[in-house]
Image (spheres, grey):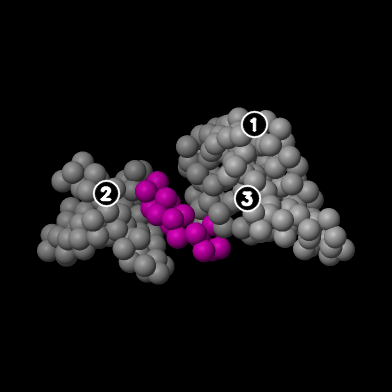
């Protein structure tokens, strides 16, 4: 509540437009958590839009993400893409990643793996490691295992916390084990699979059960 009051004071009294924009962005985030009716939502959206009008790319992304998820608001993929593209003009990796995901899944647009890969490449240059993984998955599903293997390894190298790379470890392990995109090496494959399983990641256990 104190943070809410401070942001409101700043909005009402500051002459600094960037500070006002950031305050509206932060206030919108606080109010979103407690929003319970359409009136609340309209006021919050107005705060995000005001921040957007001052080139706040995080507000662009977050408003797009809310339309994307449909949480507390009617899902609208067209508006989601509109705001993601707006944020992407500022080289915001999260927005670029979500555009890629929408092309990959065909959400509100015609599915296109080619365009998904283009956007994932951009996102990966702006810090989104998961974009490398998604690209690798696309190539793997197409049977282009050499490219998939390289991308999985790039992703693994870029994870700061290797426990976050559990699924990637697993996929590298299977590629080694079956000799897909790399010389077959069951021992090396088992070593990677073991590392992945030791993390206790539930997704790893599910994928391992399906693949093994």
Of labels 2 and 1, earlier in sequence is 1
At horizontal 58% and vertical 45% (from top left) the residue drawn is 33
Q: Identify the secondary structure beneath mark 2.
A: helix
Q: Give percent across and percent down for residue 212.
A: 15, 46
Residue drawn at (42%, 50%), measured in percent from left and top? Answer: 134
Q: Residue at the spot x=29%, y=48% of the render? A: 203
Name the side, left or right, on which 212 lies relative to 43. Answer: left
Q: Is residue 44 left or right of residue 32?
A: right
Pointer 3 residue: 30
Residue density around tag 1, few if under 14, some if 14–19, many if 20 or more, within 10 Å: few
Q: Which sits in the foreground, 159 or 116?
A: 159
Q: Which residue is mark 2?
A: 202
- Quarter of the image for residue 170 reads bottom left
Question: Disc 3 or disc 2, which is closer to the eye?
Answer: 3
Residue 149 falls within the magenta-colored stretch: no
- For the question of whether residue 158 can be seen, the reply is yes
Circle 1 is placed at which residue position?
A: 37
Q: Residue at x 49, y 49 (%)?
A: 117
Q: Nearer the viewer, residue 193 or 144?
A: 193
Asked if residue 128 lies in the magenta stretch, the reply is yes
State the residue in front, 183 or 133. Answer: 133
Q: Earlier in the sequence, mark 1 or mark 3?
A: 3
Local crowd size for mark 2, using a 10 Å CA cut-off: few (<14), some (14–19), many (≥20)? few
| Image location of residue 158, percent across then percent down | 41, 67
- In the image, 153: left or right of 122? left
Q: Position of residue 3 (x, y in %)?
A: 66, 59
Task: Label 3: state its secondary structure.
Answer: helix
In the image, residue 64 sits, relative to residue 56, either above or below, namely above
199 relative to 210, above or below: below
| Residue at mark 2 to residue at mark 1: CA–CA distance | 36 Å
Of callouts 3 and 2, which one flags the residue occurring earlier in the amino acid sequence?
A: 3
């Amino acid at each position: 509540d104190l943070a809410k009051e401070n942001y409101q004071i700043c909005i009402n009294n500051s002459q600094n437009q960037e500070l006002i924009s950031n305050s509206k962005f932060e206030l919108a985030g606080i109010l979103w958590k407690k929003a319970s009716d359409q009136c609340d939502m309209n006021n919050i959206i107005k705060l995000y839009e005001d921040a957007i009008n001052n080139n706040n790319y995080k507000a662009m992304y977050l408003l797009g993400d809310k339309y994307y998820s449909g949480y507390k608001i009617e899902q609208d993929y067209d508006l989601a893409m509109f705001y993601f593209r707006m944020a992407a003009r500022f080289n915001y990796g999260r927005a670029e990643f979500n555009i890629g995901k929408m092309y990959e899944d065909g959400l509100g647009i015609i599915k296109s793996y080619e365009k998904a890969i283009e956007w994932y490449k951009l996102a990966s240059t702006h810090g989104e490691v998961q974009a490398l993984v998604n690209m690798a998955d696309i190539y793997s599903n197409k049977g282009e295992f050499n490219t998939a293997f390289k991308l999985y390894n790039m992703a693994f190298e870029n994870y700061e916390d290797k426990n976050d790379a559990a699924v990637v470890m697993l996929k590298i392990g299977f590629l080694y084990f079956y000799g897909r995109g790399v010389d077959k090496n069951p021992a090396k494959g088992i070593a990677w699979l073991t590392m992945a399983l030791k993390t206790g990641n539930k997704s790893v256990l599910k994928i391992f059960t399906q693949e093994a």
